[in-house]
Structure formats: C-alpha cells, structure tokens
Amino acid sequence: MKKLVVITGASSGFGAEIAKIFNADGFPLLLLGRRMEKLQEVATGMENVMLDSVDVTDYKQFEKAVRKAETKYGKTDLLVNNAGVMLLGNVQNQNPQEWQTMLDTNVMGVLNGTQIVLNDMRERKHGTILNMSSIAGKKTFVNHAAYVASKFGVHGLSETIREENSAKNVRIMMVAPGAAETELLTHVTSKSALKDYAAWEETMGGVVLDPKHVAETVKFMYDMPQEVNIREVDIAATRQDS
C-alpha cells in the first residue's frame, strides 16, 4: 500500500488535478476543502479516498481530519498545502477583512498543516510538505498588495522550515505558479482589479496555465528519492511576461 497524501483546497483547480494524478498512481488520499459537494465530484470513481470539509484556518478541525485519515491509511507522507485565496484590490480602498482572509488562509493555513504533520515526519526521518505559493511570492503585481504579502510569506516560511528540517531528512518543497485556469478570481470583489487582470490575460492571448501541468510537476517533485529535494519550481504560461 502506498503512503497517505493529504491535499488541502482539493475541490478545484490545482488541488483537484493533484488529487487525480496521485489517485491514478494508487495513493490513498485525504482531500480537504470547504465545499463537500465539490470534493465529492473530484473523488468520483476514486478508491482509497477520504473527504472532509475543513477550513485550514481552524487548527483543531484540520488536525482531527488528518488524524482520522492516518488511523486508516498510516502516517501522512505528503502534505500539499494548496488551499489559498486571491482577493485582488488596491490598498487605498480594499476591505481590510479581505487582507485578513488572505493572511489567515494563505499563511496560517500553511503553518497549521505543517505543524500537524511535521513532528511525525521528523521522527520517521521521512516525509514531504509541498507548499503552493505563486509567482506573486517573489515579485510584485498591481492590485495584489495583500496577496503578494501572503505569498512572500509562504516563500519565506517554506525556506525557513526547509532549513530547520533538512538534517531530519524531511523535504519542504514549493511550487510557484503563474496565472492559471483556477477558480481563484471568482471571489474577487473589486471590479477594476478584475478588469485589469482580464486585460493582462489578454496580453497572453488569453492562454494561461492549465492546472494539470502543475499537478504533473508536483508528482515529479514528490517522486524523486527522499534524499533529493526540488526546493522550488516556478511555472507559468510561456506567454506570461511577468
């Protein structure tokens, strides 16, 4: 039996594609998301999969779901911290609650998941935590100030935790995608920010990244031997200039 893979934000986008590729290779899965009906859609036809409606900002709820899956499938060998929100807007007039939501989900959610599985991995001297960041974790974008802050945070915490755990043979990896066909934009409330983003997508001929290629990248990184850590991959549509 292959080892347990836990994926947050698994109901759509990158998370859903990562779930499909690991399931196809026979891994038992715990798929976490806030929308159970969406998770059930993703899991249709899959075997050895558990679903749980979890908000990653709720540590106890998150931990309970992971422990339940571990009771059935054994300890987590891969955690993909993929849950994230992107609420575009300008700091001049954006609702501060949107900043808080991004920081809570994109940073606290990643820290929560990491702590939940890390000590077991350290004890076993085996395991991988892969954090989904963004190109916005290494460079700036207009109307993305708070989002950029959260993703720079993911870049920083990932590298720090990697350093701290390298001697224990635990891998911390990070993938930083560019603009992609995901549902991230559906929660943006700023009409001007959406308009600017759409115009930017048009400069790429409307061709942005297919999440399945991000999933293939995650699988490739994980499939490396435990003693090899592909620390960071930046992946974007070829036509993305930024």
Image (cartoon, rainbow, N blue to C red):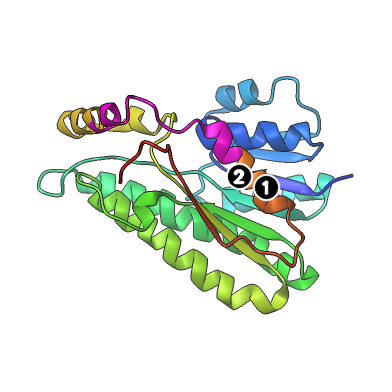
Which residue lies most toward the front here? 238
Disc 1 versus disc 2: distance between alpha carbons? 5 Å
Numbered badge on residue 130? none
Badge 1: residue crowd in 10 Å (few <14, some 14–19, many ≥20): few
Q: Position of residue 158 (x, y in %)?
A: 51, 64
Q: Position of residue 40 (x, y in %)?
A: 64, 23
Residue bearing the label numbered 2: 217
Label 1: state its secondary structure: helix
In this view, the residue in front, 27 or 102, is: 27
Numbered badge on residue 220? 1
Which residue lies most toward the right here? 1
User: In this image, 82 relative to 205: left or right?
Assistant: right
Label 2: state its secondary structure: helix
Report which quarter residue 50 is drawn in: top right
Q: Is residue 186 magenta?
A: no
Q: Is residue 136 visible?
A: yes
User: In this image, 99 relative to 167: left or right?
Assistant: left
- Check disc 1 and give the amino acid type: Phe
Q: Quadrant of the N terminus?
A: top right
- Which residue is found at the position 25% from the left and 47% from the top? 144
Q: Is residue 208 magenta?
A: yes
- Which residue is found at the position 76% from the left and 47% from the top? 4
- Check disc 2 and give the amino acid type: Thr
Q: Is residue 10 visible?
A: no
Boundaries of the magenta span: 200-215
Q: Position of residue 106 (x, y in %)?
A: 42, 51
